[in-house]
């Protein structure tokens, strides 16, 4: 009988924090910018320059720690991790080995088998390194230090995940928590959230873990899922052939769907960690923690429950609306203005999602205001415009955030609610379509639909459909 294998996965997730300035200096953290323009003597590692800790970094780290049920290390400090690499200007990285700021937390994920808690071993603060740019033309590598010193937190999970699905669920949960806190935008494609996957396989029922490998260079959920499947298959194949899995760091190539070895994995002692002599320890008081706790926003899980109770919208809608903070904020702000949650939800779930898909946009890219969506809903409810005109107007709101009241006025899109004018048009339509009138009288209900259509056409789509139906039935 073939052996059954179990995959054991732990993650190291790096998150770039949303501070305006770097962790130890006042340079800008903005993404982009010409190479080496967001730099100073501190983040380029000039001798004699001294780091000064950015307080906001500590606050974000505590906020994420509290939201992931960690205990906060109230006496914590920074250590130097020594290694030589061209994008690392000081020849060491300031990180936290001995006393990380958060420890022993966990988040709950939904799996097909029910709820499961994924443990968080620790969260520590550190600085990012620079970036190497390989110039094919000149055949050399250039260094851009703009990213050097950008503040990171590294979230280290316990090896509690057993499949790619669980990994994605855990990452999604983390991403939403951090986005809701405003601690980072967590864009995988811009590198503000990066995950390294530690993976090993063992026979089902075995107590000991197998030898693990670490995979880097994963910048989308799809790539992470493919890398996990690929590495699992590679390790099982080695074991089946009686070979050993080597502990090493591997790089995943998503185009080739293959990972290859980068380097054998060193142990912590190779980094010669020691406490950073330039930075004083951080003392985190109970009051400080309480202050941050009191300022924590409502997270997605609580929001979901509240939406279901408060707004009487379907569970599926609530799931989608809370799956990004931007969408949830839009929903709440618009509902606050027009007091019609069901209708707001419909506009966001149908038209907004359709236009986002057509324009290949994320929720974060939405730029229209709750005010203008609320005004549009009021216009439809008052019968000032009909629903097909409303869809056209919404497309313009979606792209240019125009005021629908002004737009409808300027373009003459108001629905015709004048019964006299409608009646005259409908009488004409009836006179021009004797066949449909006869069909209707012979019991063909569908014929009236054709007549409504002809009337709408004659009125350039601006008639009130309810009124058209009423008058038609009366005249027929």
Image (cartoon, rainbow, N blue to C red):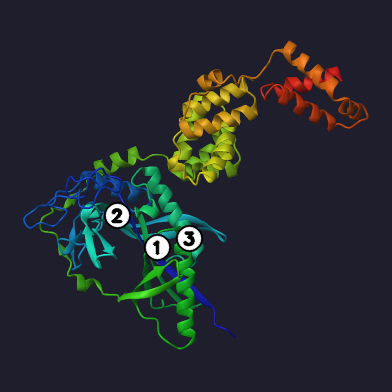
Helix, strand or loop for disc 1: loop
The C terminus: image quadrant: top right
Q: Quadrant of the N terminus?
A: bottom right
Q: Is residue 182 left or right of residue 432?
A: left
Q: CA distance from mark 2 to mark 1?
A: 17 Å
- Figure disc tally: 3
Can residue 99 be seen in this snapshot? no
Answer above or below: position of 475 versus 369: above
Give the residue at x 55% y 37%: 348
The residue singled out by tag 2 in the image is 153
**Residue positioned 38% across, 78% down in the render:** 211
Q: Which residue is mark 3?
A: 222
Q: Report the Cα–Cα distance between label 1 and label 3.
A: 9 Å
Is residue 322 in view? yes
Q: Secondary structure at mark 3?
A: helix
Badge 3: residue crowd in 10 Å (few <14, some 14–19, many ≥20):
few
Toward the viewer: 459 or 108? 459
Question: Label for residue 218?
Answer: 1
Which tag, 3 or 2, sits closer to the chain's start? 2
Q: Is residue 400 above or below residue 123?
A: above
* Mark 1 Cα-neighbour bin, 10 Å: few <14, some 14–19, many ≥20: many
């Amino acid at each position: 009988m073939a052996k059954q294998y179990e995959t054991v996965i732990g993650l190291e997730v790096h998150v770039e924090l949303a501070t305006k300035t770097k962790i130890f200096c006042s340079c800008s953290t903005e993404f982009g910018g010409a190479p080496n323009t967001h730099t100073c003597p501190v983040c380029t590692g000039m001798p004699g320059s001294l780091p000064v800790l950015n307080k906001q970094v500590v606050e974000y780290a505590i906020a994420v720690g509290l939201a992931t049920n960690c205990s906060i290390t109230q006496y914590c400090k920074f250590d130097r991790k020594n290694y030589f690499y061209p994008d690392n200007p000081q020849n060491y990285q300031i990180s936290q080995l001995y006393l990380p700021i958060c420890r022993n937390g966990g988040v709950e994920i939904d799996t097909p088998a029910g709820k499961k808690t994924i443990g968080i071993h620790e969260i520590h603060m550190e600085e990012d390194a620079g970036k190497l740019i390989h110039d094919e033309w000149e055949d050399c590598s250039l260094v851009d230090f703009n990213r050097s010193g950008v503040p990171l937190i590294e979230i280290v999970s316990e090896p509690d995940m057993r499949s790619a699905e669980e990994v994605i669920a855990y990452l999604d949960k983390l991403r939403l928590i951090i986005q809701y806190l405003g601690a980072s935008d967590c864009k995988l494609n811009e590198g503000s959230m990066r995950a390294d996957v530690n993976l090993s396989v063992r026979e089902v029922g075995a107590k000991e873990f197998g030898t693990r490998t670490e995979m880097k260079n994963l910048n989308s959920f799809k790539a992470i899922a493919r890398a996990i499947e690929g590495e699992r298959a590679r390790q099982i194949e080695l074991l089946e052939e009686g070979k050993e899995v080597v502990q090493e760091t591997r790089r995943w190539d998503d185009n080739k769907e293959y990972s290859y070895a980068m380097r054998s994995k060193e142990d912590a002692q190779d980094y010669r960690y020691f406490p950073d002599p330039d930075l004083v320890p951080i003392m985190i008081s109970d009051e400080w923690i309480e202050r941050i706790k009191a300022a924590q926003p409502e997270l997605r899980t609580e929001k979901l429950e509240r939406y279901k109770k408060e707004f009487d919208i379907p569970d599926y809608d609530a799931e989608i609306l809370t799956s990004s903070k931007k969408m949830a904020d839009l929903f709440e702000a618009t509902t606050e203005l027009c007091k019609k949650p069901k209708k707001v939800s419909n506009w966001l779930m149908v038209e907004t999602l359709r236009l986002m898909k057509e324009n290949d946009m994320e929720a974060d890219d939405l730029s229209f205001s709750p005010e203008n969506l609320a005004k549009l809903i009021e216009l439809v409810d008052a019968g000032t415009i009909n629903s097909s005109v409303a869809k056209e107007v919404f497309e313009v709101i979606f792209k240019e955030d125009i005021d629908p009241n002004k737009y409808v006025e300027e373009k003459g899109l108001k629905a015709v609610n004048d019964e006299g004018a409608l009646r005259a048009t409908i009488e004409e339509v009836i006179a021009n379509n004797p066949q449909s009138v006869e069909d209707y009288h012979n019991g063909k209900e569908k014929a009236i639909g054709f007549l409504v259509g002809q009337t709408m056409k004659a009125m350039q789509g601006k008639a009130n459909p309810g009124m058209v139906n009423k008058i038609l039935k009366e005249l027929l």
